[in-house]
Image (cartoon, rainbow, N blue to C red):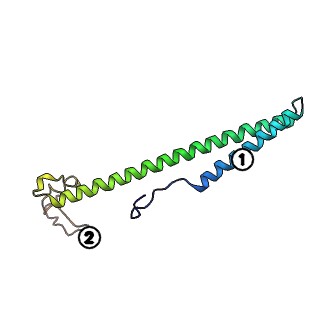
Amino acid sequence: MADPSRPQPYQPGAVSLFFVAKAGVFAAGFWIWLLVLVLRTGSATGLHVLAATGAITTTLVGVVLGARMALQHNAATRHAEVKKLLVDISWNAFAAAGNAESAGKVVPFPTAPGDNHRSGTDRVSVLDGGARDRSDRRR
């Protein structure tokens, strides 16, 4: 049984299955109609063409919708596994950072380039506007 504390992944369900079943019922109806027409009459008529076209079309629609539903189910399962793996990796990294005896065992998060290389005098607050000393500027 699944762990109730974790949210269940998205699974294509009732709506997709409804359309696959509906296409299957229509396909079965068209195939039966075509079979009845073929057994009762000797020559091909427009009704035969209509029944054959409906049977082929609805069968193909059912197959395509069934394949799409299966692909969605597999993709949802893979997505849930990747999310679980990412949570486990981040949790393990967090636990390793908390349990590290020295700073050399944990890779620090990357910072913006140049954040650690500036001296405090180079930085000017955006809110200060023009508060920097401009006496060294040449005209």
Residue to which mark 1 is pinned? 25
At which x and y percent is residue 117?
14, 54
Q: Residues within 10 Å of mark 1 (few under 14, many from 20)?
A: some
- From the viewer's side, name the closer residue of 139 and 121: 121
53 vs 85, left or right, is right
- Vertical order, 106 against 48 (above or below): below
The quarter in which the C terminus is drawn is: bottom left
Query: Who's the residue at 10% across and 56% down the image?
Result: 102
Query: Who's the residue at 60% across and 44% down the image?
Result: 66
Earlier-in-chain disc, 1 versus 2: 1
Q: Residues within 10 Å of mark 2 (few under 14, many from 20)?
A: few
Locate residue 39: give its quadrant: top right
Locate residue 58: give its quadrant: top right
At which x and y percent is residue 44?
87, 30
Amino acid type of disc 1? Val
- Vertical order, 26 against 100 (above or below): above
Residue most extreme to the front: 1
Mark number, residue 127: 2
At which x and y percent is residue 97?
18, 58
- Vertical order, 135 against 22 (above or below): below
The quarter in which the N terminus is drawn is: bottom left
Amino acid type of disc 2? Leu
Secondary structure beneath dot 2 equals loop
Secondary structure beneath dot 1 equals helix
In this rendering, does residue 87 appear at all? yes
Distance CA(mark 1)–CA(mark 2)? 69 Å
